[in-house]
Image (cartoon, rainbow, N blue to C red):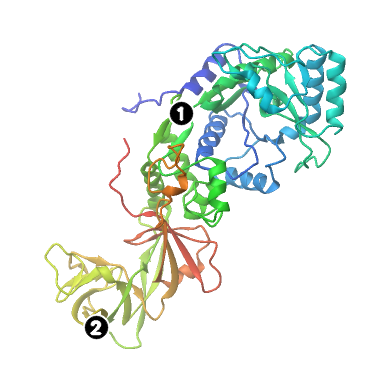
Amino acid sequence: MNNGRRKKSLNFIEQIIEDDLANGLNRDQIRFRFPPEPNGYLHVGHTKAICINFGLGEKYNAPVNLRFDDTNPEKEEQEFVDSIKQDVEWLGFKWDKELYASDYFQQLYDWAVRLIKEGKAYVDEQPSEIITEQRKNPAEPGVESPFRNRLVEESLDLFERMKNGEFEEGTMSLRAKIDMISPNMNMRDPVMYRILKRPHHRTGTDWKIYPMYDWAHGESDYLEQVSHSLCSLEFENHRPLYNWYLDQVYEEPQVAPKQREFARMNVTYMITSKRKLQRLVAEKVVTGWDDPRMPTISGMRRKGYTPTSIRNFIDKVGVAKRENLIEIQLLDFCVREDLNKVAKRVMAVVDPVKLVIENYPEGQEEWLETENNPEQENAGTREVPFSRELYIEREDFKEEANNKFFRLKLGGEVRLKSAYIIKAERVEKDENGEITTIYATYDEKSKSGSGTEESLRKVKGTLHWVSANHAIPVEIRIYDQLFTVEQPDAEKDVDFLNFVNPDSVSTIQGFAEPSLKDVAVGEPLQFQRIGYFTKDQDSNGDHLVFNRTVTLKDSYKPE
């Protein structure tokens, strides 16, 4: 009996795996991998690949390798390796083995030599521009290289000399000999190796040639005995080449990796091109790769997103074969939903005006008990200081207001959160007519939780506040979308930087309860009645900085 609950249907990748198991694949042969190139920071698009691969690992109790496809020393750095590992761990995943394509450079070279000997690869002395031109287009047969049928001995000699660094960059390449009239352009004698006399972050200057991604990727999967090589949809037309390369080295009874593709994840108001993200950093549109406005995992972490919220977001997006545009409001919904469960409730005032309770004894202070999180059964309580002089939000007071204004107004009453009922009596203004101080009286028998009849009296408004004598100054950063349009890079002829939002971040000075001195960087907080925030890494000493993660409420409802 399922008590009315519907069993969650399998996505198409899970169905493929189930079919493979039914057709003889042993469960202990299932293995996945997440294979980023360490040439930048991971972004929101990568979270889908991470969650799919590691999620399947959890579902099938199968190992997942973290393999760095480090075949391009021009763009790869140890910094990116370290950040990728941190991001995957932060999302809550553990990999089985940490591996690198560079681990296999010698094996890949040896296999390339075998292909030359078998007449399936040759050294081409044409520049890359000519090779590209000879490939033509899918509707037009390609033109064979004049070196395509050179003697095996010549190619072997030249390939070894390429490896030894005897030739300059761009003068030679090793190409697979496949099919120059194939409608799939990837099969038209793809380049397997190019000369690059650049130091590698792991192998140093040992190698002067480096394998191309397509050659290294599938063979790395094979060497690691990955059963299902899952990648985004742009690699779908690379699958025939992936399989061709595997066919050249496959030996029974090894597992032959199966490449399958899923739709990329594009989110409104975000870009995920590493080249364009690099421009944002290089041109100082943002403060760095971890700027909270960036779609990088490190940026989202700094903004205050939680690993659970991101994983829930990916789960709601689902695994599909067709690409679509995901609304950023869904991501915000998932973040807000999780923060509501885990964020500690605190009091901070972002646009303060002073409130003086005239009949509260001067010099007296109380420490009032308040809940840390009513959504958590064992979240506990803490004490906040209360005194005669407080700060409240300026927008929470009006001298005159109609019956629909449930905050404080002259002659009106509100409850101060976890404290007393107060009544506004008069105001003091400066020479410009701006209110500088609100004077009020309090009902000393109305203390929250005291059990008196007055404490149970209902008033329509409840305000948050901070004791002026105990308040700590805080810098509050309010973040909005980095771009003003949903798809800033949709138009090829328009520079995406034209759509940068000039008001994507603003800074305000406020006051907070003293407990915020002790919160950790990254700890999720709810500034009551304002929004969700987190302490930023720029905080030091008495200079405390808090980033707004997301607003408190939104009208968006996921389908």
Residue 492 lies, in percent from the top left, at 46, 36
- The residue carrying mark 1 is 319
| 517, 139: nearer the viewer | 139
Instruction: Give residue 440's mark.
Output: none
Among the 4 quarters of the image, the one containing residue 383: bottom left
Residue 510 lies, in percent from the top left, at 39, 71
**Outermost residue, left side:** 403
State the residue at coordinates (14%, 72%).
Answer: 400
State the residue at coordinates (35%, 23%).
Answer: 1
Q: Along the horizontal axis of the image, is 13 left or right of 121?
A: left
Q: Which comes sooner in the sequence, label 1 or label 2?
A: 1
Residue 221 lies, in percent from the top left, at 67, 25
**Outermost residue, bottom side:** 362
At numbered mark 1, what does the secondary structure look like: helix, strand or loop?
loop
| 238, 454: nearer the viewer | 238
Among the 4 quarters of the image, the one containing residue 487: top left
Would you call the spot at circle 2 few (<14 residues within 10 Å), some (14-19), or many (20 or more)? few
- The quadrant the C terminus occupies is top left
- The residue carrying mark 2 is 429
Amino acid marked by disc 2 = Lys
Q: CA distance from mark 1 to mark 2?
A: 59 Å
At numbered mark 2, what does the secondary structure look like: helix, strand or loop?
strand
Is residue 451 at all visible to an observer of this figure? no
Is residue 150 positioned above or below 342 on the image? above
Amino acid marked by disc 1 = Val
Q: Along the horizontal axis of the image, is 73 left or right of 165?
A: left
Is residue 224 at all visible to an observer of this figure? yes
Among the 4 quarters of the image, the one containing residue 37: top right
